[in-house]
């Protein structure tokens, strides 16, 4: 996929900070704001967002984030994302999250993320 949401989440697998920054910059506005379930404060700007994604790459080497579904209502896109890779015991592990995404033009301007899909497990 070449949509900005897929481009952004594809950057989560990149270990090179330069490559990651370059890819994220093609998918988001300069004034991007992101609230992730693992952050205490809103991430503001491309550099803050890139640093946060870099922590994922550093703490979960070999893992990826893949958009597995999207739908859009009233200009807001809900993206379901599968985060996956080898767990501590060497088995493949997948964790699902959802992000609600707003865009300006063809770039992401704001994202709010949640662990899981809100459904009982």
Image: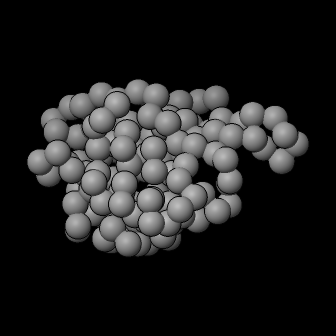
In the picture shown, does residue 47 fall above or below 67?
Answer: below
Q: Residue at x 37, y 54 (%)?
A: 23
Q: Position of residue 50 (x, y in %)?
A: 43, 65
Q: Is residue 51 visible?
A: yes
In the picture shown, does residue 69 fall above or below 35?
Answer: above
How many callouts does the rendering have?
Answer: 0
Q: Residue at x 23, y 67 (%)?
A: 30
Q: Quadrant of residue 74?
A: top left
Which quarter of the rendered picture does the C terminus lie within?
top right
| Foreground residue among 15 and 117 | 15
Q: Is residue 118 visible?
A: no
Q: Position of residue 95 (x, y in %)?
A: 62, 39
Q: Position of residue 78 (x, y in %)?
A: 34, 36
Which quarter of the rendered picture does the N terminus lie within?
top left
| Foreground residue among 1 and 97 | 1
Q: Residue at x 31, y 71 (%)?
A: 45
């Amino acid at each position: 996929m070449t949509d900005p949401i897929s481009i952004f989440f594809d950057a989560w697998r990149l270990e090179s900070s330069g490559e990651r920054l370059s890819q994220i910059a093609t998918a988001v506005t300069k004034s991007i704001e992101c609230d992730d379930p693992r952050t205490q404060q809103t991430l503001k700007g491309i550099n803050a967002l890139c640093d946060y994604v870099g922590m994922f790459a550093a703490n979960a080497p070999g893992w990826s984030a893949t958009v597995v579904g999207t739908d859009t209502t009233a200009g807001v896109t809900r993206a379901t994302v599968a985060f996956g890779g080898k767990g501590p015991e060497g088995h493949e592990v997948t964790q699902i999250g959802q992000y609600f995404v707003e865009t300006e033009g063809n770039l992401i301007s704001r994202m709010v993320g949640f662990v899981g899909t809100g459904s009982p497990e």
